[in-house]
Amino acid sequence: MSTEALPWTPPNTEDIEALPVGKRWDAVRAASPIAERALQLLGDETGAVIQDKHGPLYWLVAVGTATSWHLRQVRVLTELTGESTYLGVPPVSWTKGPSTHWRVPLSADHYLTDAGRLWGALAEADRTEYGRVPEGRQLCYRCQLPTNEPIPVEVESGDAVRKTVYVCPTHAANYPRNGLRSRTLTSTAADQHDERTAVEQTKDPFANEAWRAAIDHAAGCLACRTPGAGCETGERLLCAYEEAAWLARSFSPRPTNLLPLRR
């Protein structure tokens, strides 16, 4: 099918371009395995889908049709008052990985996904993968911060008995699919990073100031308060904090496997 027959095509034909959401379409981001299960459930009813090189899938939906969604591991990208949000869109011809590409290519029959059908598929995938959302306020087992996306995992207690706890999406990545957390290089780095940041916030004035600036921004930024989301300003403030924290401990080599601080 020729590109002239398409209802819309990305303007850049050579590389990925950051395009503003809320103009022609909004986007719905879903992390694996929710995204994969939802894509299978939708079948031929799906619209075009972007596969991010890091794993998440993005569906394009009509503007304003998904603004009130609340699902675990799912984020709606839409235009917010006083803030621009962008989505990296690959050229229409990029239909194979490993870089970001069109998992379901744009065509006359596959462009915007019906928001109602997408909600149904994602909600069913959420229930199948994680079970019912628990009632009441949940704290992440790892960071002890409240999360509106509690993901159940299994951990071993002191007597080697497994129990189910809830973690936020950021720390859910440290647990394998069977739920039991294993000690890997990544999880060890996460543990060390959590311990370092707790100490750094009390020892270095400049790091403290950078940390407060990040927290103050997050308090008034909806995107930064959404697990797994964020905005450019928030990312910049967190990078400034991490750089200050590293300088505070510059007597030791800078680790190459630091995980970005997510709250």
Image (tube, rainbow, N blue to C red):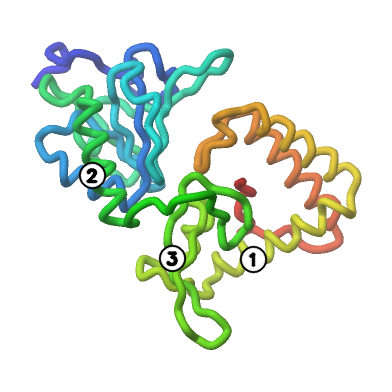
- Left or right: 75 in relation to 6: right
The crowding category of the residue bearing disc 2, from other C-alpha atoms within 10 Å (few below 14, some 14 to 19, many at least 20), is many
Q: Earlier in the sequence, mark 2 or mark 1?
A: 2
Q: Earlier in the sequence, mark 1 or mark 3?
A: 3
Q: What residue do we see at 84% from left, 56% from top?
A: 250
| Front tag of 2 and 3 | 3
Image position of 13 with respect to 248: above or below: above
Task: In this rendered view, identify the residue nearer to me: 164 or 74.
Answer: 164
Find residue 89 and name its label: none
Q: Is residue 178 visible?
A: yes
Residue located beneath label 3 in the image: 153
Residue located beneath label 1 in the image: 191
**Residue at the extreme bottom:** 159
The crowding category of the residue bearing disc 3, from other C-alpha atoms within 10 Å (few below 14, some 14 to 19, many at least 20), is many
**Type of amino acid at the residue the image marks with label 2:** Ala
Q: Secondary structure at mark 3?
A: strand
Query: Disc 2 vs disc 3: Cβ atoms closer than 8 Å?
Result: no
Task: Give the CA distance from mark 2 to mark 1.
Answer: 32 Å
Q: What residue do we see at 34% from left, 56% from top?
A: 130
The crowding category of the residue bearing disc 1, from other C-alpha atoms within 10 Å (few below 14, some 14 to 19, many at least 20), is some
**Type of amino acid at the residue the image marks with label 1:** Asp
Image position of 91 with respect to 162: above or below: above
Residue 37, horizontal then vertical, whole percent: 23, 49
Query: Disc 2 vs disc 1: Cβ atoms closer than 8 Å?
Result: no
Residue 12, horizontal then vertical, whole percent: 35, 19
Residue located beneath label 2 in the image: 38
Give the quarter of the image for residue 198.
bottom right
Q: What residue do we see at 43% from left, 22% from top?
A: 78
Q: Secondary structure at mark 2?
A: helix
Q: Secondary structure at mark 1?
A: helix
